Amino acid sequence: MRSDALRRRETILSTARELFAQHGANIAMDLIAERSNVGIGTLYRNFASRAELIEEVTVTTLQEVLDASTSAEADLAGEPQAWTEFLENLVKLNLGALSEALGAALPSTLSERVLHVQRECAQAVSQVLELAKGYELVREDLNAVELVTAIGAATRPLPRPFKDQAPQLQERLVQLMLDGFRPHVVAVNA
């Protein structure tokens, strides 16, 4: 694929991802094309259907989780800050908004392609979590499913009245959740 065609495809994917997270997976394909600065024909040449675009956004997002995990695993041994960066990277992926938007749009039977990347992700997140436990950076009773589910729950879109009344509420909730992942410190009476 030519570099300009690849850039257009990546732009469509990132725009679709953002719009799916904000408005749901049923957003008009015309709007995705418009916001991507491409014609509707270009959008459909890259993704023949909404289902194909949704699957590609899903795979791309899972790949980003996998990349963040691989990077954290490589960095964790020498740099405990890598755990915090890993968590921050997962939060930035806006997994809650995307899972809400894409969950109903994905077919009930996922393609082998999605399942393959999903399995790789689960394994990679588990490995990073176990390393972090070994360095006493995270509580021992946390498992990978809980970790990803908590991040997904904390990054779900808040109802508009909450966002309007407390604009920083989501960031605060995310920070409380991340703090809750830390190992418990038991005070010892001297």
Image (cartoon, rainbow, N blue to C red):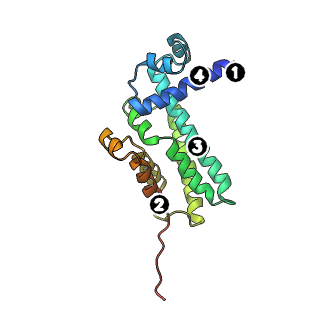
- Label 4–label 1 contact, CB within 8 A: no
Neighbours of disc 1 within 10 Å: few (<14), some (14-19), many (20+): few
Q: Nearer the viewer, mark 3 or mark 1?
A: 1
Image position, residue 81 (x, y; %): 62, 58
Considering only order in the chain, which callout, 3 or 4, is on the residue closer to the N terminus? 4
Q: Which residue is mark 4?
A: 9
- Amino acid carrying mark 3 in the image: Leu
- Amino acid carrying mark 1 in the image: Ser
Residue pictured at 30% horizontal, 41% vertical = 161
- Label 3–label 1 contact, CB within 8 A: no
Element type at mark 1: helix
Mark 4–mark 1 distance (CA, rounded to whole Å): 10 Å
Residue pictured at 59% horizontal, 22% vertical = 9
Mark 2–mark 4 distance (CA, rounded to whole Å): 38 Å
Q: Nearer the viewer, mark 1 or mark 2?
A: 2
Mark seen at residue 179: 2
Residue pictured at 47% horizontal, 70% vertical = 184
Considering only order in the chain, which callout, 1 or 4, is on the residue closer to the N terminus? 1
Neighbours of disc 4 within 10 Å: few (<14), some (14-19), many (20+): many
Considering only order in the chain, which callout, 1 or 3, is on the residue closer to the N terminus? 1
Figure quadrant of residue 165: top left
Mark 3–mark 2 distance (CA, rounded to whole Å): 23 Å
Q: Which residue is mark 1?
A: 3
Considering only order in the chain, which callout, 4 or 2, is on the residue closer to the N terminus? 4
Q: Which residue is mark 3?
A: 66
Q: Is residue 97 above or below residue 56?
A: below
Image position, residue 143 (x, y; %): 47, 57
Considering only order in the chain, which callout, 2 or 1, is on the residue closer to the N terminus? 1
